[in-house]
Amino acid sequence: QVYLVESGGGLVQPGGSLRLSCAASGRTFSSDVMGWFRQAPGKEREFVAAISWSSGLTYYGNSVRGRITISRNNAENTVYLQMNSLKPEDTAVYYCAAKSPGGFWYRGAEYDYWGQGTQVTVSS
């Protein structure tokens, strides 16, 4: 079992920045890939970014590429999502998730563990 706890969400003005954190605990060695997804009201869940604990390899969704950076701190079992130049359309609940190596990182169905989510609202 892997436990994931997100933090760092909040209200930010358009053009602003936020950094989300995802603290992982439990059997984290079995879940090499950490991903961030988001879901806005009335919309489908969307892949944001993912990173490998072991290699540091990253992968980004098309809608956020260039504005968002995913990183990890292996010593603290924490993954970060730095979001810059935020837009109102970035408003959503952001979820952290974990999966085993391989497969397709952008597919939410492949992730075994999910956090409870943190709300990000971009509004003036």
Image: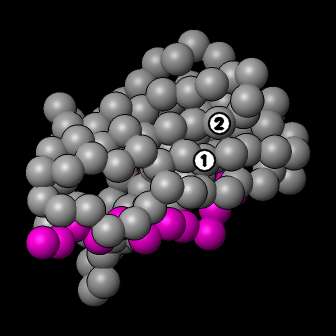
Front residue (pair 105, 14): 14
Is residue 63 shown in magenta? no
Residue 76: image x %, image y %?
73, 29
Report if residue 47 is visible in the image: yes
Q: Which residue is mark 2?
A: 78
Q: State the quadrant of the C terminus.
A: bottom left
Magenta region: which residues? 105-124
Q: Earlier in the sequence, mark 2 or mark 1?
A: 1
Is residue 115 shown in magenta? yes
Kindly state the secondary structure of the residue where label 1 is placed: strand
Give the farthest residue toward the top: 55
Residue 52: image x %, image y %?
56, 25
Position of 97 relative to 41 (above/below) = above
Q: Which residue is mark 1?
A: 22
- Residue at 47% across / 49% down in the picture? 20
Residue 51: image x %, image y %?
50, 30
Report if residue 114 is visible in the image: no
Instruction: Give me the disc on residue 81.
Output: none
For the residue marked with disc 2, what is the amino acid?
Thr
Q: Is residue 20 left or right of residue 84?
A: right
| Structural crowding at the residue carrying mark 2, measured as other residues with C-alpha within 10 Å and reported as few (<14), some (14–19) or many (≥20) | some
For the residue marked with disc 1, what is the amino acid?
Cys
Residue 108: image x %, image y %?
48, 56
Position of 33 relative to 17 (above/below) = above
Front residue (pair 117, 53): 117
Disc 2 from disc 1: Cα separation: 5 Å
| Structural crowding at the residue carrying mark 1, measured as other residues with C-alpha within 10 Å and reported as few (<14), some (14–19) or many (≥20) | many
User: Contact, CB < 8 Å: mark 2 with mark 1?
Assistant: yes
Kindly state the secondary structure of the residue where label 2 is placed: strand
- Residue at 20% across / 38% down in the picture? 67
In the figure, residue 58 lies in which quadrant? top left
